[in-house]
Amino acid sequence: MGKLRIGIIGTGNISNTHMASYKKLGNAEIAAVCDLNGERVAAYCEKYGVPVHYTDHRKLLADKSIDAVSICTWNNSHSMIAVDALESGKHVLCEKPLAMNTSEAMAMQRAAERSGRLLMVGFVRRFGKNTKIVKDLIENGRFGDIYYARAGVIRRCGNPTGWFADKSLSGGGPLIDLGVHMIDLCRFVMGNPRAVSVYGAAFDRLGARNDVKMVERYRPMDSSDTCNVEDFASAMIRFDNGSVLAVEVSFTLHTANERLYCEVFGTEAGAEIEPGFKMAGVMDGYNVDITPVYSEDHNRFQAMFDREIAHFADCIAYGTKCISPVEDGVEMMRILDAIYKSAESGVEVRIDRP
């Protein structure tokens, strides 16, 4: 087949990463771009040399020559755009989280099943080199049975504000923005066990803290003073195989120790996946620390997206089995919904499935 013709919907910051990855592929080209902001999308297309742009995603989807789209919009439009794209015969790569809630995610899954098209979720950490090595070692039995994991992203003063802090656009705060990555990373290397119950807590005591001086933070392209999402969330997630995951995330927290971490523990060995990569186990009766040797990517963030988008293209062009399917996105929404429900009710929530 010829080159895949790709449309990008949404021209916020993450779309630039998608664009860079697509441009590295020999079997894909960007055919059109869409954004609600006409001036922004026009400037974006001029920057990247894209011939066609729209302010209505339905007009982009009406182009029958376009094979697939990347959805890089606010969370509240993921489901609507994905369903429209699938029903128009397009394959879809949707940024995480898949949707605002489980109901929307299941509507997306049903649309993918009806259309026979691929709906891939942007769980980009599945494409890190460290993730591949740990997953290979676990699958080869080096860790024994994985029974516990812990992970988190703790920011001291890192609320991005804008749409990230507007619950009507994002669906929540650090849990749905940062926690989605860490929960999925742990589930993925553990073999994707299904969650059966969660106990969660969430707090909104500190706000955006825009008054803090001399602190650089990530900002979205559209500013806003709205902040009605949680500052901090934590949860204990129990899976159907008996394993447990503890997760904590914050946009703002009075801590001197900002950190990103992920660890898994098994009967034969454990591993720190983030921020450094090392294993802990026993050899000939001695406790040993093992550090796998591999060549790290020069730009790790972009490299993960490069592999993710190359995989998306391969799934479409060659029928490669998708390692980040819609079913995993739906499962993630079940977990996130349950954590928010538990945080609100103050009790453990069981996860029931139809």
Image (cartoon, rainbow, N blue to C red):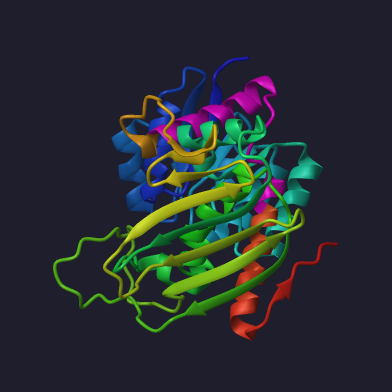
**Picture coordinates of residue 207, whole percent (x, y):** 35, 79
Residue 259 position in % (x across, y down): 35, 58
Q: Which residue of the protein is positioned furthest toward the right in this rendering?
A: 354
Residue 209 visible in image: yes
Tell which residue pokes out farthest to the top in this image: 1
For residue 256, side relative to residue 327 (left or right): left
From the viewer's perspective, tell me whether residue 287 is left or right of residue 4.
left
- Residue drawn at 46 percent across, 59 percent down: 152
**Main structural element of the magenta stretch: helix, strand or loop?**
helix
Answer above or below: position of 245 versus 161.
above
Residue 97 appears in the figure: no
Q: How many marks?
A: 0
**Magenta residue span:** 303-329
Q: Residue at x 62, y 46 (%)?
A: 266
Quarter assignment of residue 61: top right
Q: Residue at x 55, y 77 (%)?
A: 201
The residue lying furthest to the left in this view is 214
Residue 297, by quadrant, is top left
Q: Residue at x 34, y 68 (%)?
A: 159
**Residue in the foreground of this view, choosing between 30 and 211:** 211
In-image side of 217 versus 337 (left or right): left
Check the image and name the residue furthest to the front.
285
Q: Is residue 65 above or below residue 274?
A: above
- Where is residue 79? Give x, y as percent: 63, 56
